[in-house]
């Protein structure tokens, strides 16, 4: 199913930073700067009882458009290599090969249906799935 897109819709800005420090900017400084741009507070959703991560850290994303933010997150996740030994890696090994569409969410849990939610959110005007990724 292709999303209904408004051809005149302007892509939303999604701000991105990876977790690499530089000599001129430490990681806490980068996280503080991106949190100031969109007035967000960085948080961690890690829990000790969880399996190992299925993907490496993709970095931190921020946007005033929740639909563009979610779409950017999905796109970045699906471009990442799978962490060896993770649940997703075990699923890939058990079922032979990766999804030809390279869609990790569905591969990790067959009932995962993130796309209809984003399509609906865009249709009712909560935001746009079109975005411009701005690296900070």
Image (cartoon, helix red, strand yellow):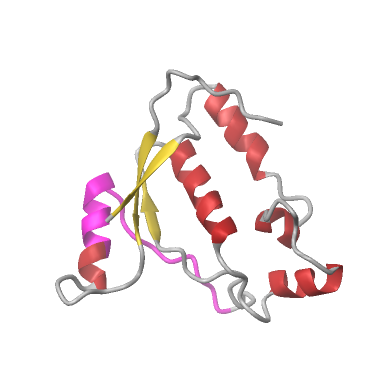
Question: Where residue 42 sits in the image (x, y, percent)?
Answer: 34, 60
Residue that appears at 21% across and 57% down: 33
* Image quarter of residue 53: bottom right
Q: Is residue 56 left or right of residue 27?
A: right
Q: Is residue 33 left or right of residue 90?
A: left
Q: Residue furthest front?
A: 100
* Image quarter of residue 5: top right
Residue that appears at 20% across and 67% down: 29
Question: Where residue 126 sits in the image (x, y, percent)?
Answer: 47, 28
Asked if residue 71 is positioned above or below residue 93 in the image, the reply reads above
Residue that appears at 55% across and 51% down: 74
Q: Residue furthest right?
A: 95
Quarter placement of the C terminus: bottom left
Please check the rendered image and state whether residue 80 is part of the magenta-colored stretch, yes or no. no
Q: Is residue 39 left or right of residue 3?
A: left
Q: Residue furthest bottom?
A: 85
Front one among 124 and 131: 131
Please check the rendered image and state whether residue 42 is part of the magenta-colored stretch, yes or no. yes
Front one among 115 and 6: 6
Asked if residue 80 is positioned above or below residue 12 in the image, the reply reads below
Q: Is residue 125 left or right of residue 133?
A: right
State how many labels appear.
0
Question: Where residue 81 sits in the image (x, y, percent)?
Answer: 58, 69
Quarter placement of the N terminus: top right
Q: Residue furthest left?
A: 24
Asked if residue 103 is positioned above or below residue 22 in the image, the reply reads above
Segment colored magenta? 31-48
Residue that appears at 52% across and 43% down: 71
Question: Where residue 32 sits in the image (x, y, percent)?
Answer: 23, 61
Front one among 103 and 108: 103
């Amino acid at each position: 199913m292709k999303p209904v897109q408004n051809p005149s819709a302007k892509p939303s800005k999604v701000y991105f930073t990876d977790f690499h420090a530089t000599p001129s900017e430490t990681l806490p400084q980068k996280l503080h700067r991106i949190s100031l741009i969109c007035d967000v507070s960085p948080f961690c959703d890690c829990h000790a009882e969880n399996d190992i991560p299925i993907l490496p850290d993709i970095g931190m994303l921020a946007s005033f458009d929740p639909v563009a933010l979610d779409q950017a997150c999905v796109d970045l996740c699906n471009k990442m290599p799978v962490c060896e030994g993770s649940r997703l890696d075990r699923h890939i090994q058990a079922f032979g090969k990766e999804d030809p569409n390279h869609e990790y969410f569905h591969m990790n849990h067959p009932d995962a249906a993130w796309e209809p939610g984003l399509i609906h959110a865009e249709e009712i005007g909560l935001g746009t799935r079109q975005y411009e990724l701005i690296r900070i």
